[in-house]
Amino acid sequence: MVEKQIDTARGVVYYWIGRHENPNAPCIVFTHGLTANHSMFEKQTAHFQKAFTVITWDVPLHGLSRPYSDFSYANCAADLRNILEQEQIGHVVLVGMSMGGYPSQAFASRYPEMTDGFVALDTTPFGRSYYSRSDLWWLKQVAPIAKCFSENALRKSMAKIGFAHALFL
């Protein structure tokens, strides 16, 4: 994978690309979850590079893609489109894990002509119409609560919850 970047008015966005030897090979874009970075999918990218061009990136405000101002999923979608234009890629299959499903869905809704598919991994639908008033109120509480934790503490607690959840499946 080759590290690259795009410069935007909001900040620098880093991405990694593994080009398949066939220039017509389909492209898969992997988008990580909250508090993670591009390395989340390193095992998958190693596997899929055998048949696909593969892109993974540090979503703005994650990994190397910070500082970044005016974060929104619409801006993430525009940044991803700029990455694809820079790489001259016209169609993608999007893979989004948890929070990574939101920029993927924002991209798919804004650029359906470029989206060949979407794989949702432990994510939820993007858009207010899917949620009740109570759901929306609780979602607004996440950011203030998350500020009470360091990045390391948040990551560790999420890992423990995920492990405990897996024990009960």
Image: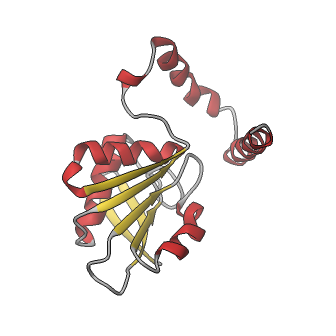
From the viewer's side, name the closer residue of 74 and 164.
Answer: 164
Q: Foreground residue, 138 or 130?
A: 130
145 or 104, nearer to the observer: 104
- Tell me where residue 37 appears, x and y as whole percent: 55, 58
Residue at coordinates 39% horizontally, 60% vertically from top-left? 13
Residue 19 rendering spot, x and y as whole percentages: 38, 80
> In the displayed structure, does residue 121 sit left or right of residue 78?
right
Query: In screen coordinates, is 164 left or right of 21?
Result: right
**Horizontally, is 81 left or right of 149 in the view?**
left
Relative vertical location of residue 118 with respect to residue 39 in this rendering, above or below: above
Q: Residue furthest left?
A: 113
In the displayed structure, 106 sits above or below 5; it is above
- Give the tally of numbered discs: 0
User: Relative to 167, does residue 128 appear above or below in the rendering?
Assistant: above
- Location of residue 52 (image quadrant): bottom left
User: In the current view of this chain or complex, which residue is farthest to the bottom?
Assistant: 21
Q: Residue at x 31, y 76 (%)?
A: 25
View extreme (front): residue: 169
Question: Residue drawn at (36%, 29%), measured in percent from left and top?
Answer: 127
Quarter of the image where the C terminus is located: top right
In the rendered image, residue 97, in percent from the top left (x then y), is placed at 52, 49
Scheme of colours in the image? secondary structure
The location of residue 126, given as percent across then percent down, is: 39, 34
Left or right: 161 in relation to 67: right
